[in-house]
Amino acid sequence: MKIIFKAAALILVSAIATAQTTPAKPKSTAPAKAAGAPSTPAQTTPAAATGPNVAATDTVITVPGLCPPNTPPESCSTKISRADFEQVISVVNPNLPKEQRREVATLYVRLLSAANEGKKLGLDKDPVFQEQRRLAELQMLAQAGEKKMFESNKPTQQDVESFYTENTDKFEELSLRRIMIPKSSDKDAKPEQTKQLADKIHERAAAGEDPDKLEADAFLATKAPGAPPTTSLGWKRHGAMDPRHEPQIVALKSGQVSEVLEDGQGYYIYKVDSKRMVPLTTVAKDIENALQTQRTKQTVMQLLDRTKPQLNDAYFGPPETEKKEAPVAKTPAPK
């Protein structure tokens, strides 16, 4: 029985937490996202009634045997109206599918029954329980406060447009090709021969030859195993390319090829087929979310700086950064 009650509580609490903390996912690709994004809660609009003829005051759940202490047995029951139950739904998950309401109703009644027994046993007067309830209330208030701070930091349309204009590099896309010249695994092969091959491939690429053909020639010349991979990397945004090579790539103009780049596996030549800007309409919501997140983080940090605690070192001990290492005893020199 304890397991059943605990499971019911966990499921309902999980549903409540999900409804409070899960932000709506944007459909487009986000620009450089700030870390520590606070949650955007779902709207808490009561769900519509399953039955169109059920009034708000009509009873939708009857719980026999659930009543306050000293209630006569013949009168011991609890009735839950549609309005009361939909208030529960609005907190648990306002977007809950209709077919799951029966399950939530059953879990809710189990919690009511267990809580009622706990109250009969006087557990609500227990100091430990009261402190747990106080901490839970603090946590809920903190989450609600973070939600309000997030909402109050929503940028204007002008803010979004200014960010887009001032950060054009974040929204530039490159149609990219990459030619790989693998280093030979033959122990008798001379490294300078592969480098010479890479330089020749580079000259041909700069002259406009097809990258796929050039890579196939390179794999054939180096006797590399397997089929050469496709040279097309598709459209790439800043930050989505190999960080070792990105500075050289983004400096290229449409139609240009990079210098020969090297790592332990081989040599690489990049070609930018074309460049384009992602339209503002595509990324506006992502910019809004990124700015809102960044501003909220700044607001939270300012709040924490204003309320930085002063701790009693006699009780807590010195801060970690101020703890001194114990002096190392010196071994006396032999006489």
Image (spheres, rainbow, N blue to C red):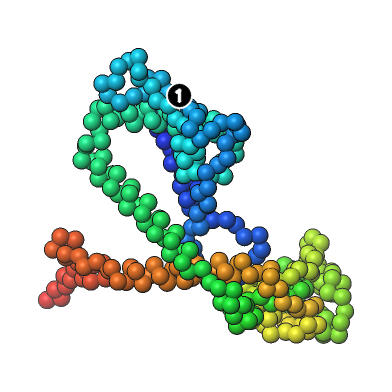
Eyeballing the image, is 63 above or below 86? above
Locate residue 199 relative to residue 94 in the image: left or right.
Answer: right
Residue at horizontal 69 percent and vertical 80 percent from the top: 249
How far from the left and from the top, in percent, is residue 173?
A: 71, 75
- Judging depth in this view, the residue of 78 and 131 nearest the camera is 78
Residue at horizontal 45 percent and vertical 36 percent from the top: 84
Residue at horizontal 43 percent and vertical 64 percent from the top: 149
Eyeballing the image, is 310 above or below 77? below
Task: Answer with the quarter of the image where residue 114 lies.
Answer: top left
Is residue 263 shown to the viewer in this render?
A: no
Element at badge 1? strand
Residue at horizontal 35 percent and vertical 14 percent from the top: 74
How far from the left and from the top, in percent, is residue 148?
A: 43, 61
Disc 1 crowd, CA 10 A, few/some/many (<14, 14-19, 20+): few
How far from the left and from the top, in percent, is residue 216?
A: 84, 69
Count the numbered circles shown. Answer: 1
- Judging depth in this view, the residue of 137 and 239 nearest the camera is 137
Image quadrant containing the C terminus: bottom left
Amino acid type for the residue under numbered disc 1: Thr
Is residue 68 shown to the viewer in this render?
A: yes
- Judging depth in this view, the residue of 236 and 17 nearest the camera is 17
Eyeballing the image, is 207 above or below 172? below
For label 1, the residue is 62
Eyeballing the image, is 252 above or below 103? below
Q: Pick out the residue farthest to the top.
A: 74
Locate residue 308 relative to residue 216 in the image: left or right.
Answer: left
